[in-house]
Image: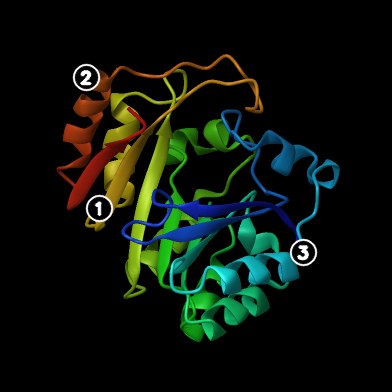
């Protein structure tokens, strides 16, 4: 698998689990606020970390690291993702998959194999503004398909949105609420600008403004929280 980064220990990326994070290259979106610009735009320029090195780390940390979060880029673009996950499960590790939801057939196949324990799917925006936030001409029927698959998966999951002042407003969240109505968990993630994003210069909302959006989402989703403030 094309691995370009390894965060050896985290308490933040897999809720309730001491985990390692594997960063894959390539993405089928071009979100202008993405913080992993190099992985998305030019993954070939990034150092490669072998699967062997990842498994050596996990074997050394056996009993401490309980899970692995696979993120990107977009992991579902990796042809050998399933094989990699099977190797993790053989080590009795929990597996969390971060995805943009644009390859529902891959998500469904992994779920049918029973090798995923947690899925986090990014909801980029409302259907009307999805292409603007995703940086491509996005087919929102594909997004809806993935939402339906995940909500009916029977495993732990969350939806989340990185909130950017220039791309999201109250109407956005009313419509996202309709899109994921009845979901278990949804997180508003405060945007933080940096020179590592694809298009620097966006801005964030205040904590008070994010609380307003949280209130709108709580009418549709069971648990709504804010990250990054």
Q: Which residue lies under the disc numbered 2?
A: 208
Q: Specify the label residue 181 is tagged with.
A: 1
In the displayed structure, 76 sits above or below 135; it is: below
Q: Which residue lies under the disc numbered 3?
A: 50
Left or right of 86? Residue 46 is right
- The secondary structure type at the circle numbered 1 is loop
In the displayed structure, 38 sits above or below 75; it is: above
Real-space Cα separation, disc 2 to disc 3, in angstroms: 44 Å
Residue at image coords 31%, 75%: 154
Q: Which numbered mark, 1 or 2, is in the foreground of this view?
A: 2
Q: Which numbered mark, 1 or 3, is in the foreground of this view?
A: 3
Q: Specify the label residue 206 is tagged with.
A: none
Q: Earlier in the sequence, mark 1 or mark 3?
A: 3
Q: Position of residue 190 (x, y in %)?
A: 38, 29
- The secondary structure type at the circle numbered 2 is helix
Front-most of residues 8 and 213: 8
Q: Residues within 10 Å of mark 1 (few under 14, many from 20)?
A: some
Q: Which numbered mark, 2 or 3, is in the foreground of this view?
A: 3
Front-most of residues 146 and 156: 156
Q: Earlier in the sequence, mark 2 or mark 3?
A: 3
Q: Position of residue 229 (x, y in %)?
A: 32, 27
Task: Give residue 224's quadrant in the image.
Answer: top left
């Amino acid at each position: 698998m094309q691995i370009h980064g390894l965060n050896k220990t985290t308490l933040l990326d897999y809720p309730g689990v001491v985990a390692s994070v594997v960063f894959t290259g390539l993405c089928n979106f071009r979100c202008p606020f993405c913080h992993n610009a190099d992985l998305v735009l030019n993954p070939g320029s990034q150092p490669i970390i072998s699967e062997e090195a990842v498994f050596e780390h996990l074997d050394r940390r056996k009993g401490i690291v309980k899970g692995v979060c696979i993120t990107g880029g977009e992991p579902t673009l990796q042809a050998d993702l399933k094989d990699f996950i099977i190797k993790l499960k053989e080590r009795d590790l929990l597996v969390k998959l971060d995805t943009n939801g644009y390859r529902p057939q891959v998500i469904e196949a992994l779920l049918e194999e029973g090798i995923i324990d947690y899925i986090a799917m990014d909801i980029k925006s409302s259907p009307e503004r999805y292409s603007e936030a995703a940086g491509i001409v996005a087919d929102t029927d594909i997004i809806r398909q993935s939402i339906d698959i995940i909500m009916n998966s029977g495993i732990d999951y969350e939806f989340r949105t990185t909130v950017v002042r220039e791309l999201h407003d109250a109407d956005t969240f009313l419509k996202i609420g309709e899109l994921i109505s009845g979901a278990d968990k949804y997180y508003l993630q405060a945007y933080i600008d940096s020179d590592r994003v694809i298009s620097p210069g966006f801005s964030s909302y205040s904590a008070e403004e994010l609380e307003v959006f949280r209130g709108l989402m709580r009418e549709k989703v069971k648990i709504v929280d804010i990250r990054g403030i």
